[in-house]
Amino acid sequence: MTKNKCDALDNTLKELKSFVVAFSGGVDSSFLLHRANSLKEPDFIGVTIRTPYIPASEIEEAVEFARFYGINHHVLDMAFPESVRNNPVDRCYICKKTLFTQLVAFASENGYKYVVEGTNADDTGTYRPGIRALKELDIKSPLLEAGLTKKEIRELLHQEGLSVWDKPAMACLLTRIAYNTEVSEETLRMIEKAEHFLFEKGYPGTRVRIHGNLARIECLPGYFEKIIRDPEKEHIINNLKKIGFRYVSLDLEGYRSGSSDHEISHL
């Protein structure tokens, strides 16, 4: 079954012939970019957009991935869109529309016919308002069209020996901030530093959600006992306070993708 889906993906990419791959450095876009590169036929380039609310480590990993596999790649810088400065409820739609408008312009200016991105078959079952923006701009989603799921994509990457196969899911830093809250560069850097510290300490996939001067840590269930043990707990608290948080809490529900989205029904 997976082979049929891969064949469908390859056929789609060959038919498109000329395209820009929106490359975030995550699992899905890495697989898409690597697959396009393995075909040799399409004329394509990977483009990563660098904004203040994307962790610098994500950009660096995207650059390194493209360099390692000899893939044509470009980093496009974009200032903080004022339309999402107050983190509105439709932030994801506005952001996606803004970013992909830039990618469409880049494609047009550089002779590429399409823009493709890494939405997979699982993404349609979750709250993803950005998908509406993709449809409005006629952005292609080859993984979705082929019916490939996140699990299948990770398995294929693992089979091909690509280290990103088990990379934790990543979302922009705006998702760590409550809706209808003004976003500052200082807040973004605090979140970025806190999550990087926790990653370095051995807690990949951990989210640090900010509520005023309080850091709410969401970690995977397997990390609960370790994270609350002394001296580990004190070390984490001290470092997050040095970063700028006054209070540090551990969310007993653990990491949940889109955990802030429940707010929408109350707005």
Image: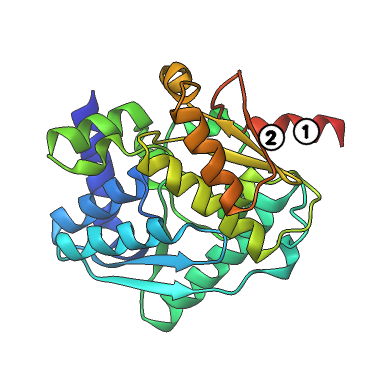
Closest to the observer, 153 or 227: 227
Query: Please, is residue 84 above or below residue 112 in the view?
Result: above
The residue singled out by tag 2 in the image is 260
74 above or below 15? Answer: below
Query: Is there a contact, CB below 8 Å, between mark 1 and mark 2?
Result: yes
Q: Which residue is mark 1?
A: 263
Calculate the distance from the C-alpha at mark 1 to the C-alpha at mark 2: 6 Å
Q: Residue at x 32, y 39 (%)?
A: 167
**Between residues 128 and 193, which one lies in front from this camera angle?**
193
Callout 1 secondary element: helix
| Image coords of residue 216 (percent x, y) | 64, 34
Relative image position of residue 73 (x, y in whole percent): 29, 70
x then y, percent, for residue 64: 24, 62
Q: Is residue 248 left or right of residue 257?
A: right
Q: Residue at x 77, y 52 (%)?
A: 88
The quadrant of the picture occupied by the C terminus is top right
Extreme residue in the bottom direction = 109
In the foreground, 237 or 249? 237
Secondary structure type for disc 2: helix
Q: Residue at x 43, y 38 (%)?
A: 169
Name which residue type carries label 2: Ser
**For residue 41, side relative to residue 178 (left or right):** left
Whether residue 46 is visible to the viewer of this picture, yes or no, is: yes
